Image (cartoon, rainbow, N blue to C red):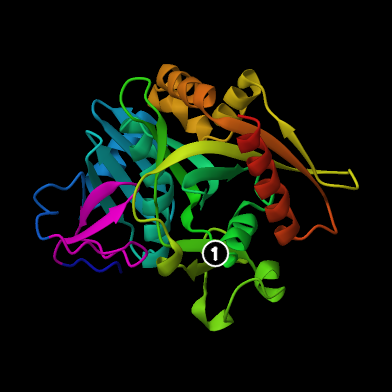
Amino acid sequence: MISVAQQTEYRAFGLRISSEIPLPELPVSVDVEERANADIVIEAGVPDRLWVQLESAGSNFARIDNRFLFLIPETAFYCIEDGRKITVSPLAGADPEKVRVYLLGPCMDTLLMIRNTLPLHGSAVEIDGKAYAFLGDSGAGKSTLAAAFVSEGHRLISDDVIAVTLAGDGGMPVVAPSYPQQKLWRECLDLGMSMERGNYRPGYREIAKYAEPVATRVCDGPIPFEGAFELVKSQAEAVSVRPLPNLERLGVMLLHTYRNRRIRRLGLEQWHFKVSEGIAKQMKGYQLNRPLEGVTANRLVSEIIQTIREGEEDK
């Protein structure tokens, strides 16, 4: 049974969030005016009415007027309204943590797109005051690489969902920090990349992953989005980094948008292409090919830093 409490104010993705569902993953805001000026309001509801509406639509995901409804079986109904309000209706016996996982994952990335923010699937860190994203397929090493940067003193911006917006019409792209935690594969912990195993708790979506709190090593405000590295595992014997021309950078943005198969159902194809194109034109892009075995995350950190430094010298 999910608990419902008095509205609490949080911040994530540059948004002020007021929620009556406790969200321990998010930093609590101490601003007493946050509730009145909240960008997002999260409320608990009951599933009966939404169940009837989705059955009529014949799908677990439907757009009905200004609302987006979806069902996660054995978990909850979620309703996003006007890009500002989220109603969460847990099903009987649902695990509260699982309810929050889907609220802060699929539900939040859908809301970001409705609010004209591009959610990229990857991790991002701050390097020399600028945001760099690590993108790639599941298991490419995005979170592990971000953890290696954090262990070397860089600040984490986001893990899993990277929120990129264009400042004004055609303005510079910026990234807003997400949650103060990382999701690390078990083998990353076993190799001693992180601290004490007791500081971690299992993540829900990937049983073999653990969530690491990194509150003291997280950016606290928007960061200019400078570039992205697409991580690709290959049969090559050595690490290689290849600059991407504009058309390939656009392809990377389109491909690695979080849950991009949902974009058509949201009716956001034209917006998705336009914002991805605007970001791709202004960012640096690289493809980092790494051998399947024998290369440490710290070695990849060195390759990436060298690539960035060389790019600065070529200006």
Q: Where is residue 214 in the image (x, y as percent from the top left)?
A: 46, 67
Q: Can residue 136 be seen in this view?
A: no
Q: Which residue is drawn at 50% across and 79% down?
A: 199
Q: Position of residue 115 (x, y in %)?
A: 30, 33
Q: Examine the rendered structure and indicate whether residue 310 appears above or below residue 5.
A: above
In this view, which residue lies farthest toward the right?
237
Q: Examine the rendered structure and indicate whether residue 68 appears above or below residue 130.
A: above
The local crowd at label 1, few if under 14, some if 14 to 19, many if 20 or more residues have their Cα within 10 Å, is few
Q: Is residue 20 visible?
A: yes
Indicate left or right for 256 with 242 as reference.
Answer: left
Indicate left or right for 238 with 145 as reference.
Answer: right
Is 166 or 310 nearer to us in this picture?
Answer: 310
Instruction: Please name the amino acid that badge 1 sits on.
Output: Gly
Q: Name the residue under label 1.
A: 153
Q: Position of residue 291 (x, y in %)?
A: 84, 49
Q: How many marks can you see?
A: 1
Start-end of magenta stretch: 6-31
Is 202 or 228 nearer to us in this picture?
Answer: 228
The quadrant holding residue 287 is: top right
Q: Position of residue 89 (x, y in %)?
A: 27, 53
Q: Is label 1 in a helix, a strand or a loop?
A: loop
Looking at the rendered image, the quarter that the N terminus falls into is: bottom left
Which secondary structure dominates the residues rendered in magenta?
loop
Is 285 or 10 nearer to us in this picture?
Answer: 285
Q: Which residue is drawn at 20% across and 44% down?
A: 39
Q: Examine the rendered structure and indicate whether residue 183 appears above or below residue 89.
A: below
